[in-house]
Image (cartoon, helix red, strand yellow):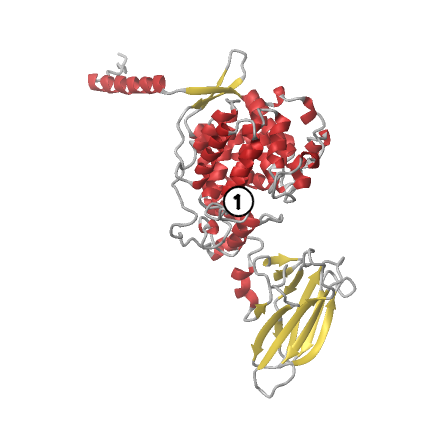
Amino acid sequence: MKADHSIVLHPIVIWVALCVWSISAMQAVGQEFRRLPVKEYRDKMKAGWIGQIFGVSWGGPTEGRYQKIMPLDKMPPFSEDLVNDAFGQDDLYVEMTFLRTMEEYGYDVPIRQAGIDFANSGYALWVANAAGRSNLRNGIAPPDSSHPKFHNCAGAIDYQIEADYSGLIAPGMPDVVIALGEKFGRLMNYGDGVYAGQFMGAMYAEAFFEKDVMKLIDAGLKAIPAESLYAGMVRDMLQWHRENPTRWEKTWELAEKKYNQDRNYNISALDVKREGAWVLMGLLYGNSDLDQTIIISCRCGFDSDCNPSSSGGILFTSRGIANLPDKYYRKLDETKVFSHTAYNFPRLLDVCEKLARQGLARIGGRIEKDANGEEVFVIPVKAPTPSKFEDLKNPGPVAASLYSDEEMAKIRAPGLKWASKFLDGWTLTNCDFSQSSMLWESQGRRNVFVLRGLGRAAKGYVLTKTVNKPGTLEFVATCDPKTEGWKIGVNADGKELGDVIVNRDSMKNGWTQVSSPLPDNAGQPITVEITIGPVKRPAEREAMPALSFTVPTLVTR
């Protein structure tokens, strides 16, 4: 006789299951979705990168030259070759650092790891980016790396420039944009500095579905705190545009008076509200014309390459490659690699698509196939939840976030403020600590200090230490062999013991040996001073060449 394995369901179990099904069905019916074919996504995302490139390349020669409306005849001529001129632009490769972090660690990457990756970037930086990275390299972990207590340009333009990526990988997903701002924007910016990037990113995210500039701006506004000064700037620009719909120069005068001249609003160096106004100027008065949008943002002056890069990128995204004149992309060299990255154009597009798929899954979206078997992003529609409001002029408390020694060991070039403890008791003066660092290893040497800037009016670096026994002072030093080199002198209790020139001729296997016997001071302490000065000082606007050295050690007799 066969056993009866049929399952008898209890009526209560059936009732619960039906209730769950009914609730799910009602939720599905009430949830609105947007559909975006993956091919269209890639097409518009690629156009967004092209728009950034044209904006920054076209405006590049004018950067910082005008703090007024730039005359039209000073606008550089358009060239199709501009599409290949931004592979070395920080407007592009800095944000690709964030993409690389996400590619390696995913959306759940801890902000502390994001900070370590940014600290390990090898390119030159300025303003908030430089200050934030310096803090990271000196052990101040995010979010404190961007807190106004630790640097004075937390409301600068930097994350606004770099936030394009966040919208390009989050089509129709403003909450993803906001979360990315809270992670990567926090590395260098605070308050309005973060909101500016979230505003730009949200406009990009909306541009995959909307061409109307007013609706794009509205989408951006909904993604940031309404009480922020940046949101107030956006509302001002909209009001001034209504009052002067055809006179962008008049609106420029109003914006410049409030957001440049008035120190209640122009708070930081390269204040993001002023620069954000020039992005909006192009979008509001460009009449959706690709060239005119870039030209107007550029002619507003100040940071006149970054701002047209933002306005151009947003507008180009709304069009897509399929709807762009081919003058913008037919000369694109897709084999070129962006500086300081692993990305050429095909690789960049693939990484963005990969991250867009991951972001979609995180917000409960899905991927379906249409009647032709083509993939389609199905994106839930949800009103964004802006970040918590922060007042740049009255910042909140710090988080007391510091990197551990184990975390600092992952930073290839810790800053000198943190690394000075490895100087073995030597005191270093006349050094620009914000520009200098220590390498854990360089050319087979451990704990190599790299000095990159003298203090104001200083003629040379000075290392000082008191030693209690005689011996020979020994260390090695190196510099760029193309420079005139450095002169290193050793003094003991004010007496000159000799000097060494560090240059191409003296460097053997990349290093110059410095060896100086100290006098026998009958058991009394000796004050040793090492002076390090350039053989030839650079011209006023030229950077000081770097000098690297190992920690001086005393070899006893």
Q: Viewer-proximal residue, 58 or 434?
A: 58
Question: Does residue 378 appear left or right of residue 58 in this picture?
Answer: left
Residue 60: image x %, image y %? 66, 39
Disc 1 packing (10 Å; few <14; some 14–19; many ≥20): many
The local secondary structure at tag 1 comes to: helix
Residue 107, can we see it?
no
Location of residue 209 with respect to 513 vertically, above or below: above
Give the farthest residue toward the bottom. 522
Question: Does residue 454 appear left or right of residue 114 in this picture?
Answer: right
Residue beneath the point at 54% across and 29% down: 284
Q: What amino acid does circle 1 point to?
A: Asn
Residue beneath the point at 76% across and 57% down: 482
Residue 232: image x %, image y %? 44, 37
Question: Does residue 490 appear left or right of residue 151 in this picture?
Answer: right
Location of residue 310 with respect to 186 vertically, above or below: above
Give the farthest residue toward the right. 505
Q: Viewer-proximal residue, 279 or 469?
A: 279
Q: Viewer-proximal residue, 406 or 237?
A: 237
Q: Viewer-proximal residue, 195 or 416?
A: 195
Question: Does residue 236 appear left or right of residue 285 in this picture?
Answer: left
Residue 431, can we see it?
yes
**Which of the image's four quarters has the C terminus?**
bottom right
**Which of the image's four quarters has the N terminus?**
top left
Residue 85, located in which quarter of the rendered image? top right
Q: Which residue is mark 1?
A: 260
Location of residue 26 with respect to 250 vertically, above or below: above
